[in-house]
Image (tube, coloured by chain):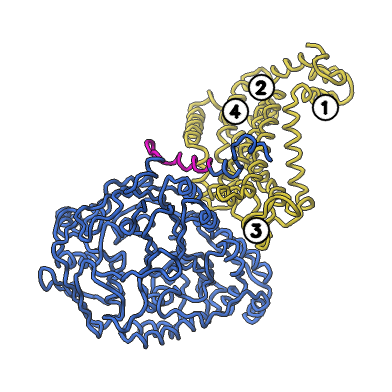
Amino acid sequence: MSSRRKLGFPLHRRDVLKGGATLAGAATLPVGWNLDAVAAAGSTLVIAAPATPQSLDCNFDVSLGTFEAIAVLYDNLLEFKKIPDPKQSGAFREDTADHPDLPAGLAIQGKLAESFELDPAGKFIRFQLRQGIKSNWGNELTADDVKWSWDRKFELGAIGAFFLSTLGLEKKDGVKVEGKYTVSINLDNPNPLLAKLQPNLYNPIYDSTKCKQESNSDDPWARKFLENNSAGFGPYRLDQLQRGQQAVFKARDDYYRGKPAMDTVVFREVPTSATRASLLQGGAVDIAQYLQPLEIIKLRGEKGVAVDSVDASFMIWLELNAQIEPFGNAKVRQAMNFAFPQEQVLKTVFQGIASPLNGCMPNIYPGFTNQFWKYKYDPEMAKALLKEAGMSSGFKTSLAYNAGDPVQEPIAILYQTALRDIGVELELRKIPPATFYNAVSERKQPIIFYVDSPWCPDVGYSMTLYFNSKSFVNYSNYKNDDVDALIRDTARTNDQAKRLEMMTTAQGTVMAEAPWVFIAFPGYHFARRANLKGFTYYTSNNIRFQDFSREA
Amino acid sequence: MSNSTISGPAIPAGPEAVTSGVGRFPRLRFFFAFLRLRPSFAVGYAIVTTVVAIALLAPWLAPFGPMDANPSVYLLPPGGSHVLGTDGTGMDIFSRVLFAPRVDLAIAIVGTLLSAIIGGAIGALVGYYEGQRAWRRALSTVVMRSADVLQAFPVFVFAIALVAVFGQSVKSIILAIAFVNAPIYLRLMRVQVLSISKLRYVEAAYVAGASDVAILRRHVIPNAIAPLVAQLSINIGWSVLLTAGLSFVGAGVVAPTPEWGSMIAMGFQNIVTGQWWPSVFPGIALSITVLGFALVGASIEILADPARRRVLSGSLS
């Protein structure tokens, strides 16, 4: 028997570390935060997140905290129906599957819209809005709000312009107010995404009455106001935003679907994942977001904590820049894939909680296929391909990774070691998180990590994003005329069977030409207190506070 | 104080003994007597000697390649063939801890020497010309106020900014260290030169027709350099810490180069999940090294100060 047992005080080294880490985490909380009080507060939800929202204007900001804020401050016209997650008991997810028997072929339903009518040819969609819905400023939802929301996209461009171009909506007149509660979107050409894009997180409806009140001649679209405030029809209103510290949201009593169970949501910035995990473990927070694989594994065994793991639209890969030699050569790109120790990375870095990225789009979306996957780790094949490419003596290149993503550095190190075996010398470049996205979008790095997910559950949308030579998000500079043509044709037809066929062909070409080094589907892992129920997975990979309730 | 206060053989009385030529290797005997009187300094020298030896002998001492990732043995706890365990990518922590001083010391020593040379040279010129012609006085004022501005910035933040400007590389870190340390040497040298340049032998050299450069090189700088040497050791330890700090925040040495700060950064998140060894061992090595250089610096400070050395000689006699 150890001395600590004799003392009747079973304190173990691990407990000390755990306690210390919790205290360290607690030290990051604002003065006056009573941890016990927080844990006991039944209708208060406390979330430890890597960042608070930077801007609340989703036309311009794509930061992590902003996703969560937009999802609760605003509502969309339509939503996907929810179904129980087939793999994770107690969790739900959007039903994004194809349903040929349902209207629009989708399990989609009205949200702000009471009903909708979709042109079978895909040229228009008409919404009948619910009556009596109030914004957080007390203004009633009307067709004018929908019209103003789309007009704002036309006028301000940025993310809004992406929606317009994706739909092929070229004129403001395309959005027509047909009555106080009736509005339609009309296209010149058929578009299969007309209904699918409506539930998109970044396609919300604004309270135009309030926005117009906050506008002036210098700022006719209320940019300044919407950066720091909300004017929407969502279930929460913003109570406080201290950037870098916390955001506080209050449930709306007059929300048209009933007041959410969680009355107050404290969205606290805790930059270090270890601290977030400790706070959850110690009961100081209800949810810890974006944890490392090891922390997720550890939390799974902790009392009072639960981790929901579901398949997700997230993908992580390496962009091989086709405009920087030698990556213009498909054989070199294939060699880089055969030299990637995917299995080892999944086991050591992801601790087995991710699955192999064996395709070029999310495997949870209709149309995904892994039939073209061939890049199992094979250094001899990699050497042979390099020889065919005339680079048998190898070459020197560099890989840029995000200092803020804890999985990228170990993956880079493992890859660096593996590439030495085929004569490729890989220099690692660590990029600060604040400038990483710039480094990606500049397209000046030979190889760079990228983590992304197409939010619209559509094969054509996904392939367009990453492999259309004109897409801004095609960071590997991949260009194949056949793929471009297939993507273009897929966007012009509403025949889903034909679309799937064309996109299968495109996936085959892309996988053969390997513009990426395929790493993993990391999945979505949601760490929470065990008594918190209602987790739902959305393709935008963010949570929505209104889903949660606490068990007594 | 009598010799009975310290153990061992009779001790020569420092500089006096040196000038009188008592015993063989009188300076060395004085030095060892000094270390016996202040054993903590002996610990400092032992640490520095050991760290330097490890840096030189690392390729022969390390059982594994410092950058060889082996996923089949990731996060092994200390023991067995991996004495200090392995990190998240299966790299041997013992081997990396042994190789790390090569990077840390090289950066710290080169950066600090560079700062001493640049800062010392500017300080000597500023101190020598201060109080002379108007434009030289003005130049001296500009230089000193510029140094004030540089020193007003928090050193670590300033170093991060410099690395960001120059780009992330070993060269940039050396430049950053040189840049942030230079004002220290500038001030030290200026103060020394200000007092020395007014001494008779300097005036005599001037009257004899020696050029300013010759006076500075032969008569002023050699007599003003002692405090800078003392500062060097302290600064090297501090620079090791700064290098590690920069690497820890991601602005220093890029992984997987074996470097203590980078190793701590790679492993610190694992402490909460129970894998403490990837970050704790490099942290211990870093602490010991910095302590060693600080102790050596403190000892040199005493030895380089004639007044304190005289007091010490009295204690040893």
Q: Amino acid at mark 3?
A: Tyr
Q: Is A24 part of what is drawn in magenta?
A: yes
Circle nearer the viewer, 1 or 4: 1
- Work out how far the residue at label 3 is from the one at label 2, CA to CA, in angstroms: 65 Å
- Front residue (pair B280, A515): B280
Residue A168 location, quadrant: bottom left
Circle nearer the viewer, 3 or 1: 3
Q: Judge left or right: residue A501 versus residue B260.
A: left
Q: Is residue B236 visible?
A: no
Helix, strand or loop at label 4? It is helix
- Residue A424's x, y, as percent? 64, 69
Residue that protrudes farthest toward the top in the picture: B1
> Subunit of mark 1?
B
- Work out how far the residue at label 1 is from the one at label 2, CA to CA, in angstroms: 31 Å
Up-down relation of residue A151 to residue A26 (above or below): below
- Work out how far the residue at label 3 is from the one at label 1, CA to CA, in angstroms: 49 Å
**Residue beneath disc 3:** B74
Circle nearer the viewer, 3 or 2: 3
**Residue beneath disc 4:** B188
Up-down relation of residue A162 to residue A407 (above or below): below
